[in-house]
């Protein structure tokens, strides 16, 4: 694969958790790459380690082993402040921001760029406006976050990540609580951000058929704890999709890009 | 939220603050005519020595004490609510006030009658009480940090705070059983809560520490806003979460300890006032919420102070008044939580 646009790469990464004195390794020997302008979907069954891997990739949890290289430096050695200029996050965490307006919420994305008191200048305001427009939430700019639907809320959180102006955006299950229409809209939006804004976008998802249709690349966590990477066509052709679930009675149907039983 | 609403709220609060302060100057156990009060304040004197002393050494310090205590406890509550991501957090319900109280009890009961009144004339005795309060509040905050890492549930943390309060009060009772009668009396009257405990000589220490801590909280507005999104987002925005949390709890501890040492363990103000400020502004944005919380806290505390002195039969303890204001507001908030923006 051509890695000229690579801006983020892991080297021999191992992730898992520490349980008292024991270390449980979920995934190891990972050499993963994110590229500018590409949408990558991370798929795997529940408990396979999707969230653990994402938490390591965003440095929320220290990996058990390995390094993450960005621009010739190890992400793990950087300060929180430096990392905030590299990765923008959209997580499923509950937020207390119902009484902020969408503009204020998106404005928080400017924090890595603002001074000690977090005041926004004219340029910051323009970037906030542009981010809301790109995420398709500008129509709700002065509404309270509490008045938004789940889909709109997700767009606002994506706009917040955009306002952070990071080359990489990582999203933990961005479509988990959305209805079908919002799910498709959100995925389309992320695809546009990758293709037209040149962002490297990584998302974890349950929604396999949509990820297969819209992602440029897939990372599959197989039942035997390997991470297979490649384009949809490659992985489907290799039969990798059948290694995603333990249950032998369901199998992947390439015609419909989904599972049947 | 519009700028207009913010400006109007601040103006209304400032007007209320001034009116209540004037009322506190005018009303009290002794009737002093308004024109004489103006004479006294302008430095001419009223010709009545007793009146001069009442205004300058009793009522004015009480107004300053109450306003600062209200602001300090309210900001303390706001910081706790944001730090623990818990709208029902406050210095009294989480046991921070009782921790400070235990520290005070140890000092008062240990020094016992030797104090000569609650705050003796000597600088040393009230500094010892202040230090005791700081240590007590600090210990409780460390306990809370430790438990908040183990129990993720907000309700459980509140229950732990209540348990801490029970524990400290039982320790205080044990101390009482071995203390001198005068020490016990001093401690019990301190526990009622009152804003008349800060003398003119002590004011610079009391006001100085509170104002410094309030300035400190104003410098934390940016990370406070990031924390509204939870710790993971805050970290993603470049915030060093554990350091920020420690600074915020340090400020909370200092504010609560100073007020508790001088005024007693005052309930409800810290819990309720941040909600009053949020609801009147319609925002959780700390850059606006913090000034409104400071002003509302001062207003509520002055209101309590006024109620406590207008009774012709003697002074009503502050802690008899705060629940009457606080409980209905908390009930309103609990019942309406689905309709209040900042819960959703």
Image: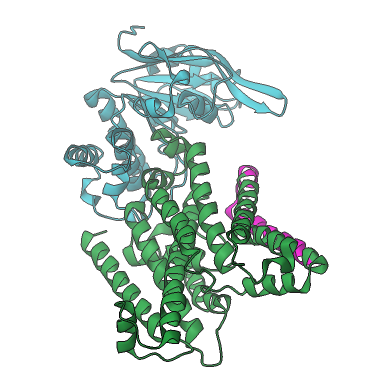
Chain colours: A cyan, B green
**Residue A97 placement (x, y as % from top left):** 39, 51
In this orientation, which residue lies closer to the viewer: B65 or B166?
B65
User: Does residue A52 appear left or right of residue A126 in this picture?
Assistant: right
Please say if A152 is above or below B103: above
In this orientation, which residue lies closer to the viewer: B165 or A183?
B165
User: How many numbered marks have been drawn onto this rendered protein structure?
Assistant: 0
Task: Name the residue rendered at 59%, 53% in the picture.
Answer: B134
In this orientation, which residue lies closer to the viewer: B233 or A32?
B233
Please say if B262 is above or below B238: below
Q: Residue furthest right?
A: B178
Task: Name the residue rendered at 39%, 90% in the picture.
Answer: B32
Residue B126 seen from this side: yes
Q: Is residue B317 magenta?
A: no
The C terminus of chain A lies in quadrant: top right
Residue A173 seen from this side: no
Magenta span main SS: helix
User: Does residue B86 appear left or right of residue A118 in this picture?
Assistant: right
Q: Is residue B169 magenta?
A: yes
**Residue A155 placement (x, y as % from top left):** 31, 42
The N terminus of chain A lies in quadrant: top left
**Residue A130 placement (x, y as % from top left):** 19, 38
Task: Name the residue rendered at 40%, 46% in the picture.
Answer: B220
**Residue B179 placement (x, y as % from top left):** 79, 67
Which region is colored magenta? B146-173
In this orientation, which residue lies closer to the viewer: A85 or A131?
A85
């Amino acid at each position: 694969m051509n890695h000229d646009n690579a801006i983020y790469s892991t080297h021999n990464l191992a992730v898992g958790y520490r349980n008292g004195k024991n270390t449980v390794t979920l995934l190891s020997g990972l050499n993963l790459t994110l590229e500018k302008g590409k949408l990558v979907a991370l798929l795997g069954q529940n408990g396979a380690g999707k969230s653990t891997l994402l938490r390591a990739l965003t440095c929320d949890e220290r990996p058990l082993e390995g390094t993450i290289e960005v621009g010739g430096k190890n992400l793990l050695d950087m300060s929180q402040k430096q990392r905030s200029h590299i990765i923008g996050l959209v997580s499923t965490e509950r937020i207390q921001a119902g009484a902020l307006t969408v503009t204020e919420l998106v404005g928080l994305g400017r924090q890595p760029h603002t001074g000690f008191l977090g005041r926004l200048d004219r340029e910051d305001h323009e970037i906030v406006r542009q981010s809301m427009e790109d995420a398709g939430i500008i129509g709700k700019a002065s509404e309270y976050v509490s008045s938004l639907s789940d889909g709109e809320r997700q767009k606002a959180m994506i706009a917040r990540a955009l306002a952070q102006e990071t080359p990489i955006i990582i999203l933990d299950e961005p479509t988990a609580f959305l209805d079908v229409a919002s799910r498709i809209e959100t995925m389309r939006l992320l695809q546009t951000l990758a293709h037209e804004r040149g962002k490297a976008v990584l998302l974890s998802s349950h929604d396999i058929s949509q990820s297969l249709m819209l992602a440029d690349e897939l990372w599959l966590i197989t039942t035997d704890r390997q991470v297979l990477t490649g384009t949809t066509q490659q992985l489907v052709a290799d039969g990798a999709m059948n290694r995603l679930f333990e249950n032998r009675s369901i199998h992947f149907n390439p015609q419909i890009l989904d599972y049947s039983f | 939220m519009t700028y207009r609403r913010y400006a109007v709220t601040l103006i209304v609060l400032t007007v209320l603050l001034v009116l209540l302060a004037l009322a506190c100057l005018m009303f009290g156990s002794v009737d002093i005519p308004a024109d004489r009060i103006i004479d006294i304040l302008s430095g001419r004197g009223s010709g009545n020595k007793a009146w001069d002393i009442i205004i300058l050494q009793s009522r004015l310090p009480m107004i300053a004490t109450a306003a600062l205590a209200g602001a300090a406890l309210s900001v303390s509550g706001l910081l706790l609510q944001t730090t623990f991501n818990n709208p029902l957090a406050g210095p009294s319900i989480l046991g921070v006030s009782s921790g400070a109280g235990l520290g005070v009890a140890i000092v008062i009961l240990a020094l016992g009658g030797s104090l000569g009144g609650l705050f003796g004339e000597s600088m040393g005795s009230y500094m010892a009480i202040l230090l005791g309060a700081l240590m007590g509040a600090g210990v409780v905050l460390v306990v809370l940090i430790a438990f908040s890492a183990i129990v993720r549930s907000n309700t459980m943390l509140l229950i732990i705070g209540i348990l801490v309060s029970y524990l400290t009060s039982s320790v205080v009772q044990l101390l009482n059983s071995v203390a001198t009668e005068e020490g016990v009396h001093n401690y019990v009257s301190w526990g009622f809560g009152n804003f008349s405990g800060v003398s003119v000589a002590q004011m610079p220490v009391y006001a100085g520490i509170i104002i410094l801590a309030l300035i400190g909280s104003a410098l934390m507005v940016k990370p406070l806003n990031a924390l509204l999104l939870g710790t993971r987002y805050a970290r993603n925005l470049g915030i060093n979460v554990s350091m920020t949390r420690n600074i915020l709890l340090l400020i909370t501890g200092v504010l609560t300890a100073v007020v508790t040492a001088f005024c007693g363990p005052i309930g409800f103000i810290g819990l309720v006032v941040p909600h009053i400020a949020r609801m009147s502004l319609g925002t959780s944005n700390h850059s606006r919420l913090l000034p409104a919380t400071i002003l509302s806290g001062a207003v509520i505390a002055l209101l309590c102070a006024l109620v406590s002195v207008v009774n012709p039969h003697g002074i009503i303890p502050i802690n008899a008044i705060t629940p009457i204001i606080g409980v209905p507001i908390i009930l309103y908030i609990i019942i309406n939580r689905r309709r209040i923006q900042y819960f959703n």
